[in-house]
C-alpha cells in the first residue's frame, strides 16, 4: 500500500522539475508519497491530501512534522471524491497523485483532470495490478476498474500518457 523509494524519488524530482506549487493526493496511507511531493513543491507549496483513515494518516502527520513539511500539507479525512467535489470551482493544481481504491480511479481521474492546469501531471499508481490487467482469466473488481481506466486514459484526447513498469505500474498523464 506504500510506494517504493524509486517512485518517491521520481515523483519528488518531477514535481520539482515542473515547478509545481499546488498538488493533490488521493490516498495518503502513512504519508510517504505526500512527503516526496511536499519536498518537491518547496517551502511555498501546498499539498491537499485526501484519505479516509485517521489511524494510518496519524503516522503521516508525525512523519511530516519530523521532515519539516507539515506546514505545506493539508489533510482532509473523508471520501476523496467528496473532498474533490467540495473544492471551489476555480481551484487548480499542477500535480496530482492517485493511489486509493481502484474502483474509484475513473471518477478521481475526471475530477482531478478538471482541476489540473494545462501541462499539469497526474500520476496513477498500481496500473499493472501485478500483471493481472493483461490476464483475461482475472476479472475481479479492482483489475476490471484498472483495465477500464487504462483504456480510457489511452483514448483520452485531452492528455498524453506513459505507463512505466515502476513498482506495480505507474501512469504519468499530462494534460494538454
Image: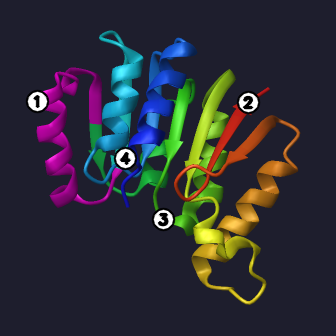
- Location of mark 4 (residue): 50
- Viewer-proximal residue, 108 or 14? 14
32 inside magenta stretch: no
The residue located at (64%, 52%) in the rendering is: 165
| Occupied quadrant, residue 93 | top right
Marks 4/1: CA distance?
20 Å
Residue 29 visible:
yes
- Any part of residue 91 in sight: no
Classify 133 as above or below 158. below
Magenta segment includes 58: yes
Image point 16% across, 21% down: which residue?
68
- The quadrant of the rendering that contains the C terminus is top right
The tag earlier along the polypeptide, 1 or 3, is: 1
Whole-percent x, y for residue 46 in the image: 36, 21
Is 85 placed left or right of 121 in the picture? Answer: left
Q: Please tell me which of labels 3 and 4 falls first in the chain.
A: 4
The magenta span reads 51-74
Q: Which residue is mark 3?
A: 101
Q: Position of residue 36 (x, y in %)?
A: 36, 31
Residue located at (54% from left, 24% from top) = 14
Are the two marked residues, 4 and 1, in contact with CB atoms closer than 8 angstroms?
A: no
User: How dense is the environment of label 4, judged by Cα within 10 Å: few (below 14), some, or many (20 and up)?
Assistant: many
The crowd level at tag 2 (other Cα within 10 Å; few <14, some 14-19, many 20+) is some
CA gap, disc 2 and disc 3: 23 Å
Question: Which quarter of the rendered picture does the N terminus lie within?
Answer: bottom left
Residue picked out by circle 2: 175
Amino acid at each position: 500500500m506504500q510506494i517504493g523509494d524509486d517512485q518517491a524519488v521520481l515523483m519528488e524530482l518531477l514535481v520539482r522539475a515542473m515547478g509545481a506549487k499546488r498538488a493533490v493526493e488521493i490516498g495518503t496511507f502513512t504519508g510517504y508519497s505526500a512527503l516526496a511531493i511536499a519536498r518537491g513543491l518547496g517551502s511555498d507549496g501546498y499539498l491537499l491530501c485526501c484519505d479516509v483513515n485517521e489511524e494510518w494518516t496519524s503516522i503521516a502527520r508525525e512523519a511530516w512534522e519530523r521532515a519539516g513539511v507539515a506546514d505545506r500539507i493539508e489533510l482532509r479525512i473523508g471520501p476523496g471524491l467528496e473532498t474533490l467535489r467540495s473544492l471551489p470551482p476555480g481551484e487548480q493544481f499542477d500535480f496530482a497523485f492517485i493511489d486509493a481504491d481502484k474502483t474509484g480511479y475513473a471518477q478521481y481521474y475526471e475530477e482531478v483532470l478538471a482541476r489540473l492546469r494545462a501541462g499539469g501531471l497526474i500520476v496513477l499508481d498500481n496500473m499493472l495490478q501485478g500483471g493481472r490487467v493483461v490476464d483475461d482469466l482475472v476479472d475481479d473488481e479492482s483489475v476490471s476498474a484498472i483495465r477500464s481506466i487504462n483504456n480510457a486514459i489511452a483514448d483520452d484526447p485531452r492528455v498524453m500518457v506513459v505507463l512505466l513498469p515502476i513498482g506495480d505500474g505507474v501512469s504519468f498523464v499530462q494534460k494538454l
